[in-house]
Image (tube, grey):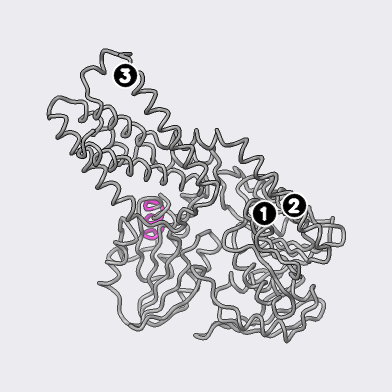
Amino acid sequence: MNSFAIIILVICGIYMLLNFRHDIHMLQQNSYRIDRYWKWLNRSGDISSASRMVNVGVLFLLFSTLLTPAINAIIVACTCCVQSVLMLRKKFKKPLVFTPRVKRIYSVCVIISIAVSLSVILTVGRGGSDAFLYYTGGQLSLGIILFLCIFSWAIAILAVWILKPVESSINARYRNEAVSILENMPDLKIVGITGSYGKTSTKHYLQRILSERYDVLMTPGSYNTPMGVIRTVREMMKPYNEVFICEMGAKQVGDIKEICDMVHPQIGIVTAVGPMHLESFKSMENVQKTKFELIDALPYDGIGVINNDFEWCANRSVDNVKVIRYGVSSSSGCDYRAEDIIYTPEGTDFTVVGDDGTSIALHTRLIGECNISNLVSAVIVALQLGLSHDEIRRGVASIEQVEHRLSVKRTPGGVTIIDDAFNSNPAGSRMAVDVLSQFKEGKRIIVTPGMIELGSEQENLNRELGKQIGNKLDVAIIVGAYNRNALVDGILSTGFDEKNLHIVDSFADSQLLLSKILSSGDTILYENDLPDSFK
């Protein structure tokens, strides 16, 4: 094989590996669950994406007689090179994490590819088909690579399926180790936090407040799955830790129970029950059932802390443990409330008031009703764990804004940025729009692709978000096509001035537009960036 052929094959081989990387990345985003990944493939159109269709076209060209084999090979290599650059330049909100599991899946994908290649080459080498006699070995090799790129998603799925027994065995061993660690720390106080939204912020707030007295470990980042919790316990738990705050995420019934059966929390916080992940949950009843798996798992002397601002929290009775209910928007049935809320350029002043006579005046650098709600739940747990009012005040006052969760920044040019890009849900987006509407200087601008994973309610809820935007803000920039129609319909139904409504294809396009329309004193709200990067 000459150097020309080797270079061509190396370029195309690298492109094939990048395709596997993309597919494994999306599998990781879907928790390596084949059913969820398959739904994502169909919903996103990835199976018939532009790059895969280009590969199909180039594959036909490769075996055509329109050009010489050498020219065909050069075209294939150039196409693979360009697509490789595009794939490497693409940015994702959650980059691929090269865990041992990812490396195992990657290795199996490569092994499958080698097996497919060898089987074809050996078959051809033995004269198994007259049709192959018209093509060179180089053409066949490139054709195999292109074929594997077109169906790389199927190879990734096959690799996950092949590795199922291996992963089950590894996970069981890791789980047993984590359980053993926790069993050997009988004095450890364990607080579980779940909810359709607000759980990550609440986790951070509670960790900072409790750190005024205790040595606290919390699940980092988005380690809210069973394996994420197991990794936290195995890799980060120390004998001197006194409190473990465990965030618990869920996409289907039973997910929270699985984590609770492992960590056995004594205190549980349910921050919200709302229409998130309805595509997998199917109904609000299932969402409620799953979130309350945390409360149901508490011991008889445990404490449940529940946000009564949400209907599906307030209407769920609990009789197995002591329950403390709290609220901001609604005081009905609440044991603790946030009162006297005052937003200032420096943050928020408010008072936590309890039916037991508790009254704690607090100041935080955070803004937004959702953040105040999350703080109230953290204050309740701090009180239950014996912290003094002064310790709670110091903790609340020192809480830093959580990046991408309604955090506020001021640019040197006098523009205020409200970053709520990490996620978006009906309650959170409504609160974010309300916060932006309170800024009176300059234009109030929102940049959003809308909300996702809301099942059959997605269109209606995004239309409602559009109405809120139209009624309260000055400029709207809608990113991408994912929820475009619903958002635009909602905005225009309010009589919003069309010249202040902008539709762009990508986040980069929105930044280019902002550079032309921004003035000192303006405020920008970035509300959810997931579809722009994930799709």
Mark 1 Cα-neighbour bin, 10 Å: few <14, some 14–19, many ≥20: many
Q: Are marks 2 and 3 in contact (CB under 8 Å)?
A: no
Where residue 491 appears, as percent x and y from the top left, is 39, 60
Relative to residue 318, is residue 129 drawn left or right?
A: left
Quarter of image, res 447: bottom left
Q: Position of residue 503 (x, y in %)?
A: 31, 58
Front residue of 170/402: it is: 170
Q: Main secondary structure of the magenta part?
A: helix
Q: Earlier in the sequence, mark 3 or mark 1?
A: 3
Which tag, 1 or 2, sits closer to the chain's start? 1
Tag 1 and tag 2, C-beta contact below 8 Å: yes
Question: Mark 1 highlights which residue?
Answer: 230
**Nearer to me, 33 or 130:** 130
Residue at 44% in and 58% down? 93
Q: Is residue 428 magenta?
A: no
Above or below, 332 against 292 in this view is: below
Q: Viewer-proximal residue, 501 or 290?
A: 290
Circle nearer the viewer, 1 or 2: 1
Determine which quarter of the picture holds residue 115.
Answer: top left
Quick check: 324 left or right of 396? right
Residue 385 picture quarter = bottom right
Q: Secondary structure at mark 3?
A: helix
Of the two numbered discs 3 and 1 in the rendering, the one whose residue sits closer to the viewer: 3
* Residue highlighted by disc 2: 262
Disc number for residue 124: 3
Instruction: Give the CA distance from mark 2 to mark 3.
Output: 54 Å
Q: CA distance from mark 1 to mark 2?
A: 9 Å
Judged from this view, the residue extending furthest toward the right is: 300
> How many residues crowd mark 3 within 10 Å: few (<14), some (14–19), many (20+)?
some
Determine if the magenta segment contains residue 491: yes
